[in-house]
Image (tube, helix red, strand yellow):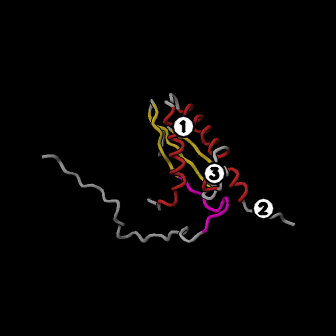
Amino acid sequence: MPVQHRKPNTSKKHPGYKGYPYLLRELTIDRANQVWATDITYILMACGWVYLCAIVDWASRKVLSHRGSISMDGKGAWRDNVFVERLWRSIKYEEVYLHAYDSVGQAKAGIARCVSFYNTARPHSSLGKKTPDEFYSATLPAIQHAA
């Protein structure tokens, strides 16, 4: 008879967990630097895994920062990272799956090229056919200069 282990049940809230309100529910997000999203994904390489983290401006979809690492030392609402998940899909299908990286350096260089193209040359229908850079720059709040 096989040994049966108790499976974790991550769908039920712990009785002591009080919960927090979802602050973006009624918020209209229509300008740069108003809301950012972040997520982590992994990329398989011949020698192991690279973990990739990105910070994305929600309104423009501009990748503000990304980093790769060979190691990675809550549960949020799916809406919080839907744009970053879409970015992961683009990076994986348009770059990663087309190349077999031999090193972390190759992976980082390829991903950096892909992110640069994504930000500066790839128009998005949801942004009125603008690139993330164009939309980000156009919707940045004007900086008020002190008199």
Q: Callout 3: 10 Å neighbours few (<14), some, many (20+)?
A: many
Q: Earlier in the sequence, mark 2 or mark 3?
A: 3
Q: Position of residue 113 (x, y in %)?
A: 62, 37
**Farthest-out residue, right:** 147
| Cα separation between marks 2 and 3 | 20 Å
Q: Position of residue 10 (x, y in %)?
A: 34, 59
The region drawn magenta spans 28-38
Q: Which mark is residue 95?
A: 1
Q: Position of residue 59 (x, y in %)?
A: 62, 59
Q: Does the CB distance between marks 2 and 1 fall below 8 Å?
A: no
Q: Residue at x 48, y 36 (%)?
A: 97
| Cα separation between marks 2 and 1 | 36 Å
| Badge 3 amino acid | Lys
Q: Is residue 57 left or right of residue 1?
A: right
| Badge 2 amino acid | Ile
Callout 1 secondary element: loop
Closer to viewer: mark 2 or mark 3: 3
Name the residue carrying label 3: 62
Callout 2 secondary element: loop
Name the residue carrying label 2: 143
Above-or-below relation of 22 to 42: below
Q: Callout 1: 10 Å neighbours few (<14), some, many (20+)?
A: some
Closer to viewer: mark 2 or mark 1: 1
Q: Which mark is residue 110?
A: none
